Image (cartoon, rainbow, N blue to C red):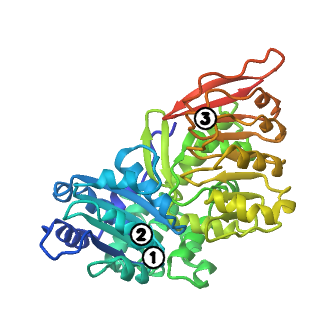
């Protein structure tokens, strides 16, 4: 478990945004008047890295805003807009439970008669028809319901907004400098290192007033007093590449990572945007792919080393939204960090979504955002080219795979998998015996399917299996006297059982 380390989010995300926050709060607190749009939709528009999400969440959490609404919900939409997935996410945000009725009836029932506040974060969809279908369902709430939309696209704002978009500006230069100094210097260090203060000012100027770039580079230099190290950031050739200040800064940060952290970071690109990582589960995923180096300290095992990797990436702002829980820690990647990882790893990682079917002969790791599209459109075309795939993450939050037949097809086609991650709510009632054919599998994450009460005996044919993560609905493990392997419950992580397969 991760305990104390320097986290920059608590003091950095809203520096210089007091006026923006006050203005948005005033807009949301205005009472409903006859003739007002229903629901009112307020877009917040700005380039990536300005802090739109942090600002929107801060506004939604303000007491003088929450008191006006019966229900508050937050949903990250991201770039693969699917009506059924957005509905499911809204329902889950409002009830904490998975969606059962995908035709919108359950959502209408939840919203009926309630004045709600909904944050739709990171919206990219520019198809008006998709929005109108969702808006019809959202109109079932009471008068005075309001929606905040964060987006980088002015076209999205035009399609969705019922009031003028709030354009979030670049952060003021003085605020950027203040932000950088808070991230880069220990207490009392600025006075002792005036030369570093000057170099820092030049670095900030190159960040072009983008807060995320400022925070990221500030954290890279935190506590470091070697002028050459600061100058190497200031004089990096990455600044000459095309970009608005944010991508060059993030590439410099990546470039400064040790090799072992670079590899772990890139492997995170197989998970979808806004994915909530669990530390104890992520480290097992890394271990399954041989990414963790053995420690020279005999008292430090691989899990301890991997957790140290997580802590380092958080302290360098490659992960964010860190939450320390009783059974571990959770965190996310900023969507721009996800974009960076995906761009750097694109030769080996492919994403299959409703709008994207990119797959190449160099693909080793697959992220499936739309199971239906994957099984019925993509897989038939690439079935002869998948022998080199080593991991699959089914990131479809509704179903994945949709049925036992699809799952068996997956097991038949991908014979050399090292890791397989399924999401919640698959519909089949029995875990296929064919799983035992995946001789190379070291990591298996099986979603919370309450219908499955036990695992097949063939699971013990997986001679290389190291980690099994499965929902607590499981009632018993298979008993096989001949089998030389047993499963020991290591930890209960929220709703998950993390099982370490040992000899």
**Is 344 placed above or below 432 here?**
below
Q: Nearer the viewer, mark 3 or mark 2?
A: 2
Sequence-earlier tag: 3 or 2 = 2
Instruction: Please name the residue shown 81% across and 20% down the image.
Output: 484
Which secondary structure, mark 2? helix
**Is 153 placed above or below 473 here?**
below
Q: Of residues 345 and 275, which is closer to you in this image?
A: 275
How far across and how far down the image is residue 475, in percent?
59, 23
Labelled pair 1, 2 in contact (Cβ < 8 Å): yes
| Quadrant where the C terminus is found in the figure | top right
Q: In the drawing, what numbered circle is on residue 49?
A: none
Q: Which residue is mark 2?
A: 133
Q: Which residue is mark 1?
A: 129
Q: Which residue is mark 3?
A: 470
Sequence-earlier tag: 1 or 3 = 1
Which secondary structure, mark 3? strand
């Amino acid at each position: 478990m991760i305990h104390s380390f320097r986290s920059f989010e608590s003091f950095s995300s809203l520096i210089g945004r007091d006026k923006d926050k006050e203005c948005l709060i005033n807009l949301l607190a205005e009472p409903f008047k006859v003739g007002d749009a229903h629901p009112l939709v307020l877009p917040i528009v700005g380039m990536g890295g300005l802090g739109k999400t942090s600002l929107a969440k801060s506004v939604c959490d303000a007491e003088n805003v929450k008191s006006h609404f019966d229900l508050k919900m937050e949903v990250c939409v991201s770039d693969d807009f699917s009506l059924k997935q957005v509905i499911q996410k809204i329902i889950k945000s409002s009830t904490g439970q998975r969606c059962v009725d995908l035709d919108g009836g359950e959502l209408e029932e939840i919203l009926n008669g309630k004045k709600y506040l909904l944050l739709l974060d990171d919206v990219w969809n520019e198809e008006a028809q998709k929005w109108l279908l969702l808006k019809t369902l959202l109109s079932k709430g009471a008068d005075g319901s309001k929606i905040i939309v964060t987006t980088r696209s002015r076209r999205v704002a035009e399609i969705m907004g019922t009031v003028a978009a709030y354009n979030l500006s670049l952060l003021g230069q003085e605020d950027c400098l203040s932000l950088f100094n808070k991230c880069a210097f220990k207490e009392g260090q600025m006075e002792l290192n005036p030369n570093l203060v000057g170099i820092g000012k030049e670095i900030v100027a190159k960040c072009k007033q983008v807060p995320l770039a400022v925070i990221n580079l500030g954290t890279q230099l935190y506590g470091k007093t070697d002028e050459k190290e600061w100058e190497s950031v200031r004089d990096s050739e990455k600044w000459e590449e095309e970009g608005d200040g944010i991508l060059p800064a993030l590439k410099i940060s990546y470039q400064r990572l040790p090799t072992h952290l670079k590899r772990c970071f890139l492997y995170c690109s197989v998970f979808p945007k806004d994915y909530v990582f669990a530390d104890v589960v992520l480290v097992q995923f890394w271990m399954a792919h041989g990414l963790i180096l053995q420690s020279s300290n005999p008292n430090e095992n691989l899990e301890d080393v991997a957790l140290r990797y997580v802590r380092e990436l958080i302290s360098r702002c490659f992960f964010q939204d860190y939450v320390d829980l009783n059974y571990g820690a959770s965190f996310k990647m900023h969507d721009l960090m996800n974009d960076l990882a995906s761009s750097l790893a694109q030769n080996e990682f492919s994403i299959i979504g409703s709008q994207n079917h990119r797959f190449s002969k160099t693909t080793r790791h697959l992220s499936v955002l739309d199971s239906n599209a994957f099984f019925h459109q993509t897989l038939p075309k690439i079935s002869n080219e998948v022998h080199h795939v080593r991991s699959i993450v089914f990131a479809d939050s509704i179903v994945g795979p949709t049925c036992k037949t699809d799952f068996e097809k997956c097991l038949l086609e991908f014979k050399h998998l090292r890791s397989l991650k399924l999401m919640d709510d698959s519909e089949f009632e029995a875990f296929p015996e064919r799983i035992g054919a995946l001789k190379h599998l070291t990591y298996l994450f099986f979603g919370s399917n309450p219908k499955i009460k036990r695992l097949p005996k063939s699971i013990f044919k997986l001679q290389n299996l190291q980690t099994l993560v499965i929902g607590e609905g499981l009632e018993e493990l298979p008993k096989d006297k001949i089998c030389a392997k047993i499963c020991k419950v290591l930890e209960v992580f929220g709703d998950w059982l993390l099982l370490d397969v040992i000899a």
